[in-house]
Amino acid sequence: MLGFEEPPKPLIEFVGGKQKIQDKMATGFTAESGDTSLSLWRQNEIAMNDIPVVHIEGSKSLRLVVTGKIGRIFEGCACPMGVVTREFLKKLRVDDNQIAIVDMEAGVEHFGRGIESSLHAVIVVVEPSLESVSIAEKTKVLTESGGARFAGAVINKTRSEASQKRLIQELKRRNIPELGCLRYHERLLDDGLSGLPVNSEETRAEAGVIVNNLLDFIQANPSLAQVSKN
């Protein structure tokens, strides 16, 4: 959906695979070692140019990095992938006019791996269901208890103005700011089923509202504004 022909190779392969990460979880990633596959993790900072080209896909304006996923039966838990994600984000350095967007799996399990401790702000996507609103409320609590900032919620897949207004009311009851709404569009469903990039004027306009609200959020938080400049 980002317009890439192939996904990049997962970062977990670059550092030796799941088993090697499990071995290193006990000793840490900064321990001296002759293993060149872990050299990236021994750096104080990781810039985009430090990532091997096979592990980063895209162009100058948009790049994709994938940590890794479960690929085989009986492979065990995904904790090593969480460790790679956390360590990578801790050291990732974004330059001027760069921003890193981290797409986590649905739910709150990743909070247990401490990934959000390396983020500047958290956004939650809320769909028209009580379960989704409840997860958003839990996400806000976990974000703030972990020291990150909670930017608010993006409403997704509403089919009517009435549904959108009701969802906004439910968010307000829980003191969750609303950043904008991405309405349900049949065309997006068709494009997603065909594996086509998102290219919708309606969605572009809706996303613009969200971006503007996020910029207002950054300006209202001076420390985040400083981060965005650095």
Image (cartoon, rainbow, N blue to C red):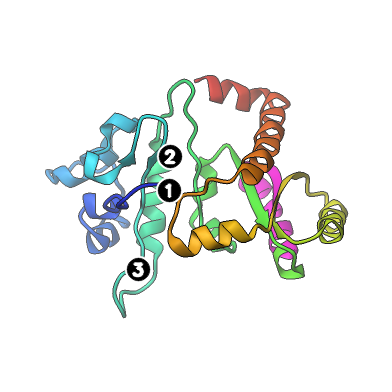
Task: Classify 10 Å Cα crowding around label 1: few (below 14), some (14-19), many (20 and above).
Answer: many
Which residue carries the number 1 mark? Answer: 86
Q: Amino acid at mark 2?
A: Lys
Taking the spot 49% from the left edge, 23% from the top edge, the residue there is 97
Using the numbered discs, state the Cα–Cα distance from disc 3 to disc 1 in whole angstroms: 17 Å
**Residue placed at 66% from the left, 45% from the top?**
202
Residue at disc 3, secondary structure:
loop
Q: Are marks 3 and 1 in contact (CB under 8 Å)?
A: no
The CA distance from mark 2 to mark 3 is: 23 Å
Q: Is residue 90 depicted above or below 67 in this figure?
A: above
Which residue position is annotated with label 2?
90
Where's residue 76, x and y in %? 35, 74
Q: Is residue 139 magenta?
A: yes
Residue 44: quadrant of the picture: top left
- Lower position in the chain sequence, tag 3 or tag 1: 3
Range covered by the magenta-colored residues: 133-154
**Disc number at residue 186?**
none
Residue 67 drawn in magenta? no
| Residue assigned mark 3 | 70
Label 2 close to label 1 by CB (< 8 Å): yes
Mark 2 → mark 1, Cα distance in angstroms: 6 Å
The answer to which of 74 and 167 lies nearer the viewer is 167
